[in-house]
Image (cartoon, grey):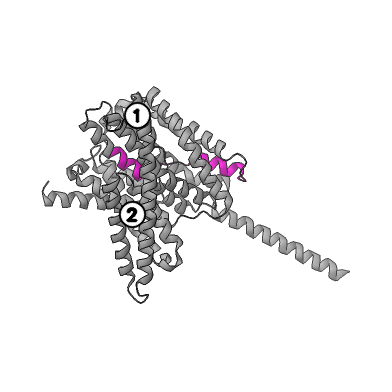
Amino acid sequence: MTPERLGLLWGITVFAGAGARLLAALSGLPGVVLLLLSGLLIGRSGLGLVEPLDLGQGLETIVGLLVSLVLFDGGLNLRLPGDTIKATVLRISLIRLVVSLAAGLIAAHWLAGLGWSVAAVYSAIVLATGPTVVTPLVQQIRLASPLGDVLEAEGLVLEPIGAVLALLLLELLVGDLHGLRELALGLFARLGGGVLIGVFGGWILSEGLKRVDKSSSLGLRLQLTIGVLFLLYGSCEWLLPESGLPASVAAGFVVGRRPSSQASQLDPLIRELAQLAITMLFPLLAADVSWGELSPLGWGGVSCVLSLMIIVRPVAVSLATIGLPLDIRQKLFLGWLAPRGIVTAAVASLFSIRLEQAGVLGAGRLQGLVFLTILMTVGIQGLTAQPLAKFLGLLEKDNLKKEELNESSNIGKESFSILTDSSK
């Protein structure tokens, strides 16, 4: 690809994403939904202006670095206040890891027609909800605590696990791994190694930020952060492929927990960069989807995704929240909202290429089913999240109104008691 054509590809992609953001701000529609639609419009399913595969091997590197930035931002802002939220996140993550993997495998095979091995890869890829989608939705609809914290934390915990597990299942499928024992050891090594390297990298970064003169420009802190993060991600991918994702989350978590790093100053800039990464990635990856990959799935693919949305997710959440102090409204909302995001799309695109190169049948159907999952979960749940939260009374303003009513009633009671006392 010529440099001119490459520049045009990025120009169209970023412009489409920025246009989708503008339309979302003007219309009030969920931005992630419009970002996906913009990618379909400029890609193979629409005008054919953008072909992500033209980036060659650089596509995987670019996507990986941008995703690491998004996950670092998530780790930086990860908050788990209170034992209830911690227990909820841990139980949802563990139970969904088992229930969703098994149910996704069965649904993809029996309903969508994927082979058992490819269906297992699909189940791991779509395991996690996407913090890149959940966080903007939570912020846009102003979801009351603790639901927003639970949904964001769930995605950050399961996103790296799903990506690493999918890679290992892929290697098992193409013959690079032999047996479940090697798969389990690989999962432990990549997740554990990634977390350990990420914790060490986060500590190094926080120490460096602490030693930067407070009078120095904030830009220097930002440059140091991005430099360390990208070096950390690149080193992890070189040592242990796919370990860069858990490392990015762990590094962000460590920096965010050390007061000496002054993460509160970095947070707005990192968040803006993460939003820019999402604005670039969603249209770019959606542009790779063609109707030729979606149409053969038919109603079987739609039924597969609907079963994950309507049956599997609510059942997993119901099991995970037994005995926890969450009311029925909160459980209903947790059981409904589970959109997939950037990491899911990125892993599907890259794995599809690897499967095609290995001559595995069903690679195109795998990518098509993953993007159908993203389109349906983001589209349906993104559009219904705010009306549902409003109907259930789970918005911050609803809680504020209730508090104001309670305060006014208390004031009224106090005034009444004063009047009755004075009359006596």
Question: Horizontal and vertical percent for residue 24?
Answer: 37, 51
Q: Which residues are magenta?
A: 324-349
Write down the quadrant of residue 200 in the picture.
bottom left
Residue for badge 2: 69
**Does residue 279 appear anywhere in the picture?**
no
Indicate left or right for 88 with 211 as reference.
right
Question: Horizontal and vertical percent for residue 142?
Answer: 49, 54
Q: Nearer the viewer, residue 89 or 294?
A: 89
Question: Horizontal and vertical percent for residue 254?
Answer: 42, 58
Q: With respect to residue 246, does 419 lie above or below?
A: below
Image quarter in which the C terminus is found: bottom right
Mark linked to residue 381: none
For mark 1, give the secondary structure: helix
Prevailing SS of the magenta stretch:
helix
For mark 2, give the secondary structure: helix
Q: With respect to residue 330, does 80 lie above or below?
A: below
Residue for badge 1: 179
x 31%, y 57%: residue: 229
Q: Nearer the viewer, residue 52 or 411?
A: 52
- Amino acid type of the residue that numbered disc 1 sits on in the rendered structure: Gly
Instruction: Based on the picture, tell me whether residue 346 belongs to the magenta stretch.
Output: yes
Q: Residue furthest right?
A: 424
- The answer to which of marks 2 and 1 sits earlier in the sequence is 2
x 35%, y 36%: residue: 166
